[in-house]
Amino acid sequence: MPAQHSRYRWFVVVVFFFFMLLHQTDKLMIGSLQVQISNDFKISNTEWGLVNSGALIVATILYPIWGYLYDRFSRTRLLSLASLIWGSTTWLNAIVKTFGGFLVTRASTGIDDSSYPGLYTLIADYFGPNIRGKVYGVLQLAQPIGYLVGMILALMVAPAIGGWRSVFYITGSLGLVIALLIFFGVKEMPRGKAEPEFENMTEMQTFKFSWTEARDIFKKKTMWFVFLQGFAGVFPWNVITYFFFAYLERERGYDANGILFTMAPVILILAGGYFLGGALGDAAFKRTNKGRILVSIIGVLLGAVFIFLALNTPTENRNQFFVFMCLTAIFMPLSSANVIATVYDVTVPEVRSTAQAVEYFIENAGAAFAPILTGLIADAIDLKTAILLICTVAWGLCFLFYIGAIFTIDRDSHNLREQMTERAKSMNAN
């Protein structure tokens, strides 16, 4: 790969990192604003769950549409459009004055939340299979760091500049800036360019979206296990994102400073867990096609164990609670980058956005109702029970689904490499 191109691809990573960082800040800081917004509109836990489920439902519906568009048209132009939508809908969410208006405009922010498949598939065409896990791990650092930035904006900046609406204006404006940066600064890459079979080719055949290849996604047994774990695996993330700060404040007695100084280190460790998971997955993948799955199994198993220990720690023992939350944060994200890389280890380049979008659709089809379910359990019992029950059950199911994928990944990965080899031979012959 020419040095100039090698440097440029890391520029693309930087641009997408900031897109994800600021977008995740905008998306996730609402969890830290729960008490402020709930008090403003005088709503219950169940109504709060409905607010967050609305955006998730919209994103779920639009995932297949975004995936299809990314496989048919320019991913860079569509990502720029997604950023424009992000900025605009966040501004609308800040303007409305009634709970009904807030509910509707918050749901509209889900339009751009389903835009990530195009980003990940474009990166897959800049970086080959043996390094993708690490790159995705770097990009996914943006999610917990965005969570941390959002927490700081919510707990420290918002009270100082006029409340939660003011920080929405800030993050919405940044979305408009990023839209321009992607539109003018990021180049489209031929689909499949980074596959090892095409490494030395100067001219690339254009692989176009095919309904036949799209249907073949569902013939790969590994994808079914990926879909099933996705359905269960996002439940804990949504529960923790939208309810954990209220749990700390209301049931463990933390004030704003206590929340910040407890959760900031935990979130930074969580960020490191994304990269660690991607790096371990790449290293294990070089030894066996099962490598990424094995790393994912370790992550969900130990994540469930440590969050169980954390939430059952007595409220007065804050140091022990902190230690167990740090351990949870190490293991909780290990599977994230590996799941994305696994999808691309078994699907052809021209339908990868669609495959990823279907996976996210199935994830959100269940997870969209996680906030509502959590709110109902919390109102009936308490937040601790809601968080603990959903997290441990969901990760237990993920463990079982990953075990299933161990028995299918070798065949599906081998079939993809054979297909890429045949395409390379055909191009050389022409």
Image: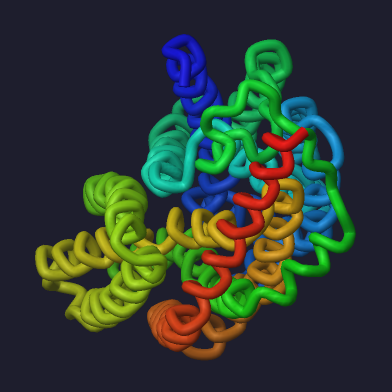
Could you say which is closer to the camera, residue 233 or residue 378? 233
Q: Which residue is found at the position 86% from the left and 41% from the top? A: 72
- Provide residue 267's location: percent of width, then percent of height: 32, 49
* 417 vs 5, nearest the viewer: 417
Query: Relative to residue 270, is residue 58 drawn left or right?
Result: right
Residue at image position (59%, 43%) is 120
Q: Can see residue 393? A: no
Rendered image coloring scheme: rainbow
Compared with 162, 429 (above or below) is: below
Q: Position of residue 383 (x, y in %)?
A: 44, 78
Left or right of 343 on screen, residue 264: left
For residue 131, side relative to residue 284 (left or right): right
Foreground pick, 313 / 140: 140
Identify the image quadrant of residue 193.
top right
Query: Considering the image in quadrants, where does the C terminus appear?
Result: top right
Extreme front residue here?
429
Rendered image quadrant of residue 299:
bottom left
Label total for image: 0
| Residue lying at 45% horizontally and 88% vertically, measured from the top left | 400
Query: In x, y percent, where is residue 29?
Result: 52, 45
Query: In the rendered view, would you say 404 is above or below 259?
Result: below
The quadrant in which residue 207 appears is: top right
Comparing 403 with 428, the one in front is 428
Q: Residue furthest right?
A: 211
Residue 174 appears in the figure = yes
On the picture, is 285 further left or further right than 200?
Answer: left
Residue occupying image coordinates x 72% and y 57% = 357
Q: Is residue 264 above or below residue 417?
A: above
x and y percentages locating residue 41 in the rendered image: 68, 55
